[in-house]
Amino acid sequence: MKKILTLISACVFGSFLSTSLYAANHPVTGEKLSADQTFTYWHGDEHSSQDPQIVEDTYGANIVRDLFEGLLSQDAEGNLVPGVAESWSANDAKDVYTFNLRKNAKWSNGDPVTAYDFVYGWQRAVDPATASPYSWYMDIMSIKNGGEAINGDVPPSELGVKAIDDYTFQVELTASLPYFASMTTHGTTFPTHQATIEKYGSDWTKPENIVSNGAYVLTEHVLNERVVRERNPLYWNNADTIIEKVVTLVIPDESTGLIRYLAGELDQGPVPPGQFKKLKAEYPDQATSFPRLCNYYYTFNLSDSGIEAFQDVRVRKAMSYAIDRNVITEDILQAGQIPAYTFTPGATAGFDTPSVAFSKMTQAERDAKAVELMDAAGYGKDNPLSFTMVYNTSEGHKQIATVMSQMWKQKLGINATMENMEWKTFLDVRGKQDFEIARGAWCGDYNEASTFLDLLTTPSGYNDGKFSNAAVDQLMSEAKTLADASSNYTTIERILAAEMPVIPIYHYAGVFMLNPQLKGWPYDNVEQNWYSRNFYKVAE
């Protein structure tokens, strides 16, 4: 007998009378609305793609959530709410999930959105011909034949998804996965329009070609400059959407981004490292900081293309111990970031941050141990270790890399050469293991510890350092079938602290400037899956 997991009304605001003329006041809050309902915000770099099955970065995910809608979405607290699916259920074993789709969802060309569009999108994600950088995500969702399809052992048509009828989509899993529904808010699982992709190929995401099903349609994309999307009049809940136009401006320099925000060009802008306290004092209703479900780390290249020194765990641990994380969070960033000694952030639901050995040491003790480990490995100021550390272009990343290299130089005699790269080049270099040590960061795709720890399993598509540990793989495999996997996650974190394949630096805070006229930001959603359709601007 199936259990209905949840059924939540999708109606949030009540209907507006037209798509272009607003009532003078917000229909729920009563606030007077601004005549200008354009939301303009900052991105630090060009996004990877607006194709749901190709996008692989946070910047791109923000855009994809406006253009497309998946089975489920999230509310301001991160709870699941209906998207294209009005309701969903699971069998008692929680290895078969059924989604009942709304009949009024349409593509931007007027076609109905059906279960077959989800079948196509999900099969496309695992098809080797698509070369989705996120195909591995479909595998960790435990979908039947997911890994086999990704590896080319079975055709994508064998993936465990099917359309029972036009408006019933069913997924068969290989294991009980209680949090499966929450994984469907990720862009990789969004539907795509088969006829459009088959007609235009890789050009299907251009503004003149794209067909999407979200609250907005793409109207302009100027590479490395801006992305514009405007309200989709065929979106099923268009009547309750208030923001008319969303503009993303690409401004690589954070200081320039802040200047343009303060000049009124942006509704949301960056806070350069070290400036939060000053900005908070000067603009208390605009400078904001809150916990994020994200980590910041450096990963060693442990593949055959990496340098020999990094194969020595003593070197890896010494380099990690020598980093004074408090200097980075308190002196450089100064905006509520948390020093990290585990890979998984403490903000993760159901995760109790375990105590790992090096987190209990003082920094002086860590420094002394680092020197001892480097000496034992044969390195020191008389025989310095040299390597290149790479990061994507950003004022903040540069400052962090600079202080890390200085700490290594002063404490361990290490010569670290810094190299910054444009975002897409950086992703390519890191993905091909064409680096020695590289910056990494991860924001949870869903709110459970496995979204982080899966990254360091042997088959993970984002295990860019190619760390491989049989115990970690086994513990993660077991965790998928456990009602409470916390002890597995604790053991894995302790293995990571002992092996140090990555250097955890800090856990993120959401830090930015926000125009006080813009309302509806989901501060309590630690995943920060925001949707422009939930925003509105009030009159000054």
Image (cartoon, rainbow, N blue to C red):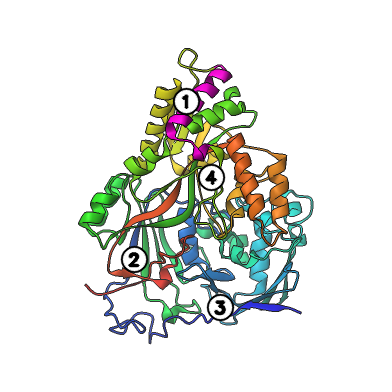
**Residue 464 visible somewhere in the drawing:** no
Is residue 359 shown in magenta? Answer: yes
Q: Secondary structure at mark 1?
A: helix
Q: Dot 3 corresponds to which residue?
A: 105
Q: Nearer the viewer, mark 1 or mark 2?
A: 1
Q: Which amino acid type is shown beneath numbered disc 2?
A: Phe
Q: Which amino acid type is shown beneath numbered disc 1?
A: Ala
Residue 27, picture quadrant: bottom left
Choose the circle earlier in sequence order: 3 or 1: 3
Q: Dot 1 corresponds to which residue?
A: 368
Q: Dot 2 corresponds to which residue?
A: 39
* Magenta residues, dominant SS class: helix
What span is colored magenta in the figure?
358-378
Q: Secondary structure at mark 2?
A: strand
Tag on residue 342? 4
Q: Which one is in front, 146 or 338? A: 338
Percent position of residue 105, x then y: 56, 78
Q: Which amino acid type is shown beneath numbered disc 3?
A: Ala
Task: Residue lying at the far top in this picture: please name it.
Answer: 382
Q: CA distance from mark 3 to mark 1?
A: 62 Å
